[in-house]
Amino acid sequence: VYKVVYAPAAMIGEQGYATLTAAIAAAQAGDTITFLADIMGDVTINKSVTIDGAGKTYTGTMTVSNGKTVTIQNVKLDNGGIVKAKGTSGTLTVKNCEFDGAGKFAYPVRINGASTVVVEDCTVNNYLYSFLYVTSGTNTVSVKNVTVENCPNYAVYFASGVNNATFENLTVKNSDNGFVINNT
């Protein structure tokens, strides 16, 4: 009889979990989930937690549930992105992340409504459409120290409903249309 032992993919405190999904299921509000390995696969973050990639690579989509306060940091997203699920509450903070869409993935950060969205100290490369796509009722968007390259359609696209937006040190290279703000 052989016993298969899996190295943990993520941990909370000193406890390891075989998958990111298992770590999220076990997490309590306020916990930090830290990557121990590169992770692949879509997940839903339905708790107010911090996801710390610890410089590891994530391939897939992280969907953040409405009403949650989530920080995603130190992750290298390879052909993936972060989606804030529909609803007008919750806070999403994305910091110190590297995004590479591999010319296949549409948006690294797509917001479908939130109280506050903060993106800072990130680099974005090779996405099909825009770095930040906001589709509906979001109160505050703050972007600071972000470099966007090779996103051919738009650097930032606000489809509707952003009350306050600030941009500080946003560098855009090789984007045909720059900003589109349709705030109706």
Image (cartoon, helix red, strand yellow):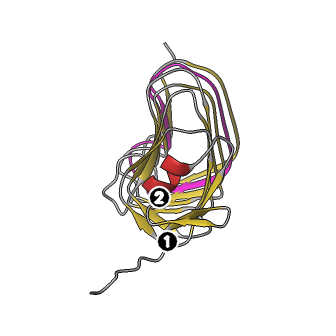
Residue to which mark 2 is pinned: 20
Against 63, is 40 above or below?
A: below
Against 60, is 134 above or below?
A: above
- In reply to whether residue 157 is colored magenta, the answer given is yes
Near-viewer residue (46 or 137): 46
Residue 121 image point, x, y percent: 68, 55
Against 25, is 76 above or below?
A: below
Extent of the magenta region: 134-159
Q: CA distance from mark 1 to mark 2?
A: 9 Å
Q: Name which residue lies at 41% across and 76% down.
A: 6
**Amino acid bearing label 1:** Pro
- Could one spot residue 62 in this view of the protein? yes
To which quarter of the image does residue 74 belong?
A: bottom right
Residue to which mark 1 is pinned: 8
Q: Is residue 39 toward the left or the right of residue 106 in the image?
A: right
Identify the main secondary structure in magenta: strand
Q: Is residue 115 toward the left or the right of residue 130 in the image?
A: right
Q: Say few, some or many: other residues with alpha carbon within 10 Å of mark 2 (under 14 / 14 to 19 / 20 or more).
A: many
Residue 123 image point, x, y percent: 58, 59
For label 2, the SS is: helix
Against 17, is 32 above or below?
A: above
For label 1, the SS is: loop
- In reply to whether residue 83 is colored magenta, the answer given is no
**Amino acid bearing label 2:** Leu
- Of callouts 1 and 2, which one flags the residue occurring earlier in the amino acid sequence? 1
Residue 50 image point, x, y percent: 64, 49
